[in-house]
Amino acid sequence: MAFHLEGLVAIVVFYLAILAVGIWAAWKTKNTGSEGDRSEAIIVGGRDIGLLVGGFTMTATWVGGGYINGTAEAVYVPGYGLAWAQAPIGYALSLVLGGLFFAKPMRSKGYVTMLDPFQQLYGKRMGGLLFIPALMGEMFWAAAIFSALGATISVIIDINVNISVIISALIATMYTLVGGLYSVAYTDVVQLFCIFLGLWISVPFAMSHPAVTDIGLTAVHHVHQAPWLGSINSLDIYTWLDNFLLLTLGGIPWQAYFQRVLSSSSATYAQVLSFLAAFGCLVMALPAVLIGAIGASTAWNETEYGVPDPMSKKEADMILPIVLQYLCPVYISFFGLGAVSAAVMSSADSSILSASSMFARNIYQLSFRQNASDREIVWVMRITVFLFGASATAMALLASSVYGLWYLSSDLVYIIIFPQLLCVLFIKGTNTYGAIAGYLFGLVLRITGGEPYLYLQPLIYYPGCYPDENNIYIQRFPFKTLAMLTSFFTNIIVSYLAKYLFESGTLPPKLDFLDAVVARYSREHMDKATLVKSDNIVLNELAPVNPRHSLTLSSTFTNKEAFNYVDSSPELSNTEDDN
């Protein structure tokens, strides 16, 4: 692979442009709101993200390096093709469902992170448990982004892919430290603009290359490889459905998505942004699909790339930058490769910011350091950015496929967090006992199903499983959806069973060690009332409490006027008077 100086210059130019926008946005964040709200301004941007910028940043929740590179890869790989490129439709539907059912209740109650409602209803312990799959999901997604960025750079510069992944991760991690959600949102505008221009300008030139056969012909006929439209065998239909549901429903409960929802200026805006982003996802996937089709329609021995083809060299995940470099004129390749590389880099900060936001607020502040200063929380976020960036880098080096990382990133979120989110928002009467039981059942069923990308053999062999070339058994049965449904119904059944046993007197109150049913007046339940601002949710909408005011407790309130807000609580008024 020859050194591509023009592409390197393009990357530097676009990186500097995005970095400049990020610095400007960080300066804007610093001058927004009071000093005491600095950490919240970083997480939700002061809740004043408008429709235009919000539409771009919501679209960029999914449209990044992993999305465009992975879509092109899926279309290009023989035997899979467009039929298996599920991410564009799956993630677009997830945004539609998120806007219809989840955006309004989350935004109207004024939460700061996705984990707030879990800690409000289930307490700190359950919030900590749910942070684990949420963190893993964000890290897998960031790993996909780093992997795509490393693959792109390795095409432009003749260096090892692993080295380029590490360098790319360092750049993206350092960039994330520049600012919070404002930096993410405004760089997303530049990111989508770069992808749109870079890819759409490149497609006509690549398609007209002499070595490229008409993609209409190769869509249904075997020319250089199997038709790029692909097909779904009858034996694989359940696997296809399982993966599609995973992308669609598992694409909803992400902090990266709800961070945009919660930063919207109103609940209605949050819904509109979700619908706009769904359309944006489909539009931005079109050039990636065409590039994958072009890669499948190219006689690579007639290009400077030579033989063997990218699939034989195990470079299928790099098909998008390969097409841009070898099938386009130099000046088009100059713009396309630089724009795509910059776009990929700018999308990495979202996942890392999401993970650090959840840790700093829901784990560090609300669970351990309720008296922590705003400056301390900001520094915790900065430190965790480095830690989470390093973890995502390690995952990117270990995984073999960008598209595989997509499925891994949604697995834990789909099986564990999605059913919990359904229960906490829409099912009345669920409690911590049911949440823990559902969590454990879902986790066990997922792990025992095996994972070929991690070379993990299954412990439960569902009908239709078969060994692959590495003798790792592949499941055809939709065991991921089974695990999700099991987690959902277990939560409901165990919750109502625990409620019945305690309220009927079958179990003594002292056994309610989680304070989930009987001990409603515990301090932990009072802490649940501190997760949201009083002007967004009234106290009687929370679980029944009999609050006891203390110096430690009051310092954890997001809005310290919350005690004065609920005039209908005589016990609360008396407590205020006594103090």
Image (spheres, helix red, strand yellow):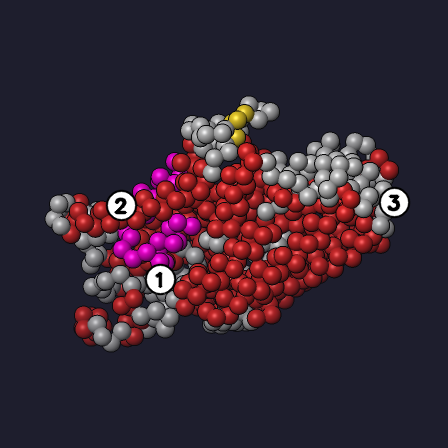
Percent x, y for residue 504? 13, 50
Q: Nearer the viewer, residue 484 or 576?
A: 484
Residue 237 lies in quadrant: top right
Q: Nearer the viewer, residue 457 or 239?
A: 239
For image coordinates 76% across by 42% down, the residue present is 218
User: What's the magenta region?
Assistant: 418-444
Q: What amino acid does circle 2 point to?
A: Val
Residue 225 lies in quadrant: top right
Circle 2 residues within 10 Å: few <14, some 14–19, many ≥20: many
Circle 3 residues within 10 Å: few <14, some 14–19, many ≥20: few
**Does the magenta segment cover residue 428?**
yes
For image coordinates 58% across by 61% down, the residue present is 277
For the C terminus, the quadrant is bottom left
For image coordinates 53% across by 55% down, the residue present is 93
Query: SS for tag 2?
Result: helix
- Left or right: 65 in relation to 462: right
In front: mark 2 or mark 3?
3
- Left or right: 263 in relation to 371: right
Query: SS for tag 3?
Result: loop
Q: Earlier in the sequence, mark 2 or mark 1?
A: 2
- Left or right: 439 in relation to 342: left
Tell me, yes or no, if residue 518 can be seen here: yes
What residue is shown with label 3? 210
For the N terminus, the quadrant is top right
Q: Earlier in the sequence, mark 2 or mark 3?
A: 3
Q: Earlier in the sequence, mark 1 or mark 3?
A: 3
What residue is shown with label 1? 531
For image coordinates 36% across by 65% down, the residue present is 532
- Left or right: 312 in relation to 130: right
What residue is shown with label 2? 494
Percent x, y for residue 428? 29, 57
Relative to 521, does residue 47 appear above or below in the rendering?
Answer: below
